[in-house]
Image: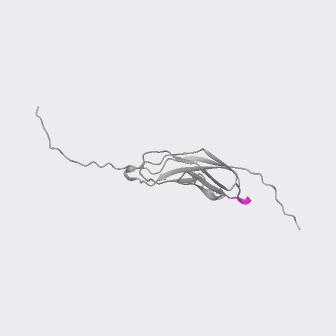
Amino acid sequence: GRNVTTPPATFALLIGYVNFPPNFTLADESVTVAEGSGAFSERFASLVPHVSKPNENVTYSVVPEDGEATGIFAVKPGIDKDGMLSFRLKTLAAVRFNGELLFNVTASNDAGTALGALDTSEVLQFTLIVTFVNQPPSFELAE
């Protein structure tokens, strides 16, 4: 056999960052409040650590399964960057609601979708349970 050698070659290998979507958990599958109870705020979402781009910003999206359900809120449900779920139910007797509402939650980061990357998590769900509160009867005397 003949021994064949080739001259050395130099090349650069560029390894690009591929974003991974945020991964998070919810504290529970449901939140229970009394109708007309007003403001609610509680730590509810936690990011699961993963390899991420430095200074990656994560935002949460909270969307009702039934888009018409938002009429019961003075402030619609949202989750801040620290995982705090906050909302305010309307307290007027005419708009009081009791029952269950299903919400879809996703987390997104700002690291982009270059090279086929994903920036939005899988959907997690929770149920908002608004319990009935018995109200005293009201009446007006006729004059």
* Magenta segment includes 94: yes
Front-most of residues 72 and 32: 32
Q: Give the quarter of the figure containing the C terminus.
A: bottom right
Q: How many marks?
A: 0
Give the x, y percent position of residue 31.
63, 47
Residue ID at (52%, 50%): 106
Q: Residue furthest top?
A: 1
**Residue 11 left/right relative to 36:** left
Q: Residue furthest right?
A: 143
* Magenta segment includes 53: no
**Image height check: is 1 above or below 142?**
above
Q: Residue furthest left?
A: 2
Magenta segment, which residues? 90-96
**Image height check: is 70 above or below 22?**
below
**Residue 92 left/right relative to 42:** right
Residue ID at (41%, 53%): 113
Residue ID at (20%, 47%): 10
Q: How is the image coloured?
A: one colour
Q: Residue furthest bottom?
A: 143
Give the x, y percent position of residue 91.
70, 58
Give the x, y percent position of residue 7.
14, 44
**Residue 54 left/right relative to 127:** left
Q: Give the quarter of the figure containing the N terminus.
A: top left
Front-most of residues 47 and 116: 47
Give the x, y percent position of residue 123.
52, 47
